[in-house]
Amino acid sequence: MKVTIPLVDLKAQYYCIRDEIDKAVSDVLNSGNFVMDRYVRQFEEDFSAFNGSKYAVSLANGTDALVIALKALGIGKGDEVLTSPFTFFATAEAIVRAGARPVFVDIDPTTYNIDASKIEDRISDNTKAIIPVHIFGNPADMAGIMEIAEKYKLHVIEDACQAIGAKYKGKRVGTIGDAGCFSFFPSKNLGCYGDGGMLVTNREEIAVVAKALRSHGGGEMGLMAYNLINGYEERGYSDKYYNYMVGYNSRLDEIQAAILDVKLKYLERWNSLRREKAYYYNERLSGYPLRTPKEEEDAEAVYHIYTLEHSSRDMIVEYLKSRNIDSRVYYPVPLHLQKGLEYLGYRDGDLKMVEKVVKTTFSIPLFPELKEEDQAYIIDTIIDSIS
């Protein structure tokens, strides 16, 4: 029997909570307020409570969250930031946009996260921060990373854009370093119907500067941030037309905030369903020549993406396609070999583990609404392809 199974089914999720979503959107439209009003404030408050962070600053997207986190920590020209080469381009792009230089550290072959044991070798006098990426919703080795950061007095910004709700040693990812960054792109575990992002932190000064930067560096927050950065109390105007910093236009829309606040109360349940389905994949595919996902000790992944590894990856992907099953390769080109970053001077062979992994990994459908019979069909088809 032929079926069509997408990698993620956003319409299936919408249909489950359509009445609540439609009401939330209607409420915003009827309010007549569409930017930085009560729905944004409510969502920030609820997200902060969910995540266990003191401050949550909503933004236009996850990339801006990374840029603004870097800027809020004073990182810029002449600085180096260590990060993973196995992630979406935005992670390195944010470092460049902040004026700094990305330095890539090879990955752990079992979790695909930055290999903490290789970080120290990449630290220089110009290193100011580490951006670990919790890739595919799987927490990185934060204990190892934080130990190194403390030793060398480095900032840590967690790229948790794929890992909303994941935990490491009982703490939500994003709350372990100086700041955490999240994306609400539609396909994320907590996704809006457009773009959105969030910066979380337990440090008041980072939150103040981030709030100023998201809205052109003006108004009350701009003045507060200016005084905080310069270390004195400047008397000024709190009107939005008085700008104290050169910032960004990176505000979360009221409609998106209202939608996200509805979805937030379902996130734990959805993530639990993702884990159940991921563990079922692991169980059924064990004993076959496939590498299934592995979690760090004391980590609780949320399986934003379920990724397998096989030496005949391309053959399996084509076979799945022929059976009307969607699959995807994340990511075919590691960041250090991207044309947009060739000025950094990396070459083939510089980071051997990630260069191997991008040739053998592929991702298969996993989302809370994935039907049991569809998942069984996917598993049977994969087994058929390698038998």
Image (cartoon, rainbow, N blue to C red):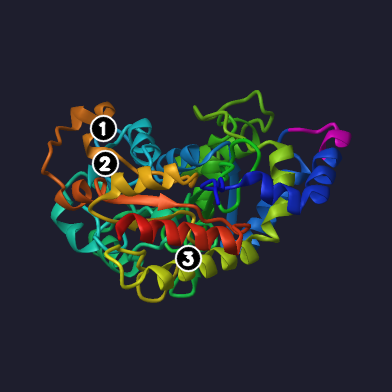
Residues marked 1 and 3 touching at CB (< 8 Å): no
**Residue at the spot 20% in from the left edge and 44% down from the top edge:** 126
**Residue at the spot 71% in from the left edge and 52% down from the top edge:** 261
Disc 1 residue type (three-letter): Gln
Callout 2: 10 Å neighbours few (<14), some, many (20+)? many
- Identify the mark at residue 334; answer none if there is no mark: 2
Give the percent coordinates (x, y) of residue 46: 69, 58
Residue under label 1: 338
Left or right side of 63 for 155: left
In this view, 385 is above or below 11: below
Measure how far apart labels 1 and 3 are at the Cα level: 30 Å
> In what element is the residue under mark 2?
loop
In this view, the mark in front (1 or 3): 3
| Camera sees residue 31 | yes
Q: Is residue 61 or residue 7 the one in the foreground? A: 7
In this view, the mark in front (2 or 3): 3
Image quadrant in which the C terminus is located: bottom left
**Residue at the spot 30% in from the left edge and 40% down from the top edge:** 332
